[in-house]
Image: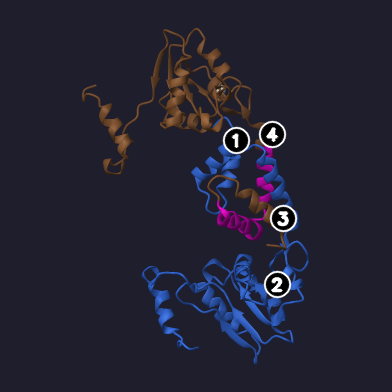
Chain colours: A blue, B brown
């Protein structure tokens, strides 16, 4: 509204968040200004607090409020297995499965030469140092099953010292998915990577 | 994440906004914490500023940063026509059409006896005062075409002094809509409210 610049400013900022379009940003602003005014100072404080205290783990780049994240601080993780992911959100998705007991390294992206994202952007120095730790036995590349994710895994595999097992997360039909709705490329890979039933 | 309480707090608050579910709240938080950290202090400031300066127009309840909103301050509005709407968002939708030159009154809701929302919640005193202004000639009820909106319009019509025209926004087929996809009730009303072609 020409008349309410503070609301316009809020709408403009909200539109920069993922998944929030112009109508959604306006709807949120009206809801806050008309019905949920108390939420505004709470949101302001939450954004300030998160900005001030959330940082990146010095060992793996995961989000953390301490120098080392919960995974890296834990005494119950298997340091011989390292899982390399693109983002803290991917790390969390794997943690949420509850089946992985190793440690992580978060690349904070993937190689994308067209966007000018080369190896130097992916914390390669620290990954190399981590790959050199003596008790490491296996590296799992869990980058996204995209062109960039595959290329990134391929490139990084070249940095892994001899004698360390290199693996890639399995691709296939999503559990619970219906074949009818699985895309052709996924289905093709699932057929190609088939396993014997008694395995 | 058990380890990042500031992020958990942010996710919990974002979920209370309209149209933002748990996955969306998490996605927004990761995006901000990983890639758009500079947006966080900007958002905090925008929420604080909007909370501090945006209030309700003393005459019509519209959102405003001044005691009177832009519509009520304007010298180019026709004070003989009053349009009664449920919310500031509805007011804006009508303003955006560019076809209405009168003034507004925002009820800030609708009658909803089941939710305990009676006439006293709808600023009836101020509406009555507005309805008593000497130059008023027509009141348009533009409450929502819902059961509650209709009942609210019916009830408020009883407060309009004799001699003032009372109207209701037309219901019918949305302009640009295809009949095939218009709901039965709307289509029925559109047939019932048909107009001669040369009108
Ligand atoms: Zn860590
Ligand atoms: Zn006003």
Q: Which residue is mark 3?
A: B6
The image shows residue B17, relative to residue B67, as above or below, that is below
Label pair 1/2, CB-CB below 8 angstroms: no
Q: Which of label 1 and label 4 is nearer to you? A: 1
Percent of width and height locating residue A115: 54, 66
Name the disc covering residue A60, or none: 2
Q: Please name whichever residue, A163 or A112, is drawn nearer the observer in this view of the structure.
A: A163
Q: Is residue B101 visible?
A: no
Percent of width and height locating residue A10: 60, 41
> For the point 58% across and 58% down, which residue is it?
B27
Indicate if the residue with disc 2 has its beta carbon within 8 Å of ligand 1. yes
The image shows residue B94, relative to residue B183, as above or below, that is above
Q: Which residue is mark 4?
A: B52
> For the point 36% across and 70% down, which residue is it?
A180
Q: Which of label 1 and label 2 is nearer to you? A: 1
Question: What distance separates the C-alpha of mark 1 from that of mark 3?
Answer: 25 Å
The image shows residue A190, relative to residue A92, as above or below, that is below
Chain letter for the residue marked with disc 4 in the picture:
B
> For the point 39% across and 23% down, which residue is it?
B168
| Label 1 environment density (alpha carbons within 10 Å; few <14, some 14–19, many ≥20) | few
Q: Say what secondary structure mark 4 lies in.
A: helix
Chain letter for the residue marked with disc 1 in the picture:
A
Name the disc covering residue A35, or none: 1
Point out the quarter of the image occupied by ligand 1.
Answer: bottom right
Q: Is residue B48 highlighted in magenta?
A: yes
Question: Which residues fall within the magenta stretch?
Answer: B21-49
Question: What distance separates the C-alpha of mark 1 from that of mark 2?
Answer: 42 Å
Q: Say what secondary structure mark 3 lies in.
A: helix
Q: In the visual, does B58 lie left or right of B75?
A: right
């Amino acid at each position: 509204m020409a008349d309410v610049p503070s609301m316009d400013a809020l709408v403009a900022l909200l539109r920069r968040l993922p998944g929030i379009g112009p109508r959604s940003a306006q709807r949120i602003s009206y809801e806050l200004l008309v019905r949920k005014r108390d939420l505004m100072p709470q949101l302001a404080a939450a954004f300030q607090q998160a900005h001030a205290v959330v940082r990146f783990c010095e060992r793996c780049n995961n989000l953390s409020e301490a120098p080392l994240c919960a995974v890296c601080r834990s005494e119950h993780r298997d340091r011989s297995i390292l899982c390399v992911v693109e983002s803290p959100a991917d790390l969390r998705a794997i943690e949420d499965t509850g089946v992985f007991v190793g440690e992580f390294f978060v690349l904070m992206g993937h190689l994308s030469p067209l966007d000018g994202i080369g190896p130097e952007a992916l914390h390669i120095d620290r990954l190399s140092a981590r790959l050199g730790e003596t008790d490491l036995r296996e590296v799992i590349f869990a980058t996204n099953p995209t062109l960039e994710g595959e290329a990134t895994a391929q490139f990084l595999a070249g940095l892994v010292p001899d004698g360390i097992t290199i693996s890639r997360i399995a691709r296939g039909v999503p559990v619970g998915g219906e074949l009818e709705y699985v895309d052709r490329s996924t289905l093709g890979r699932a057929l190609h990577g088939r396993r014997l039933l008694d395995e």
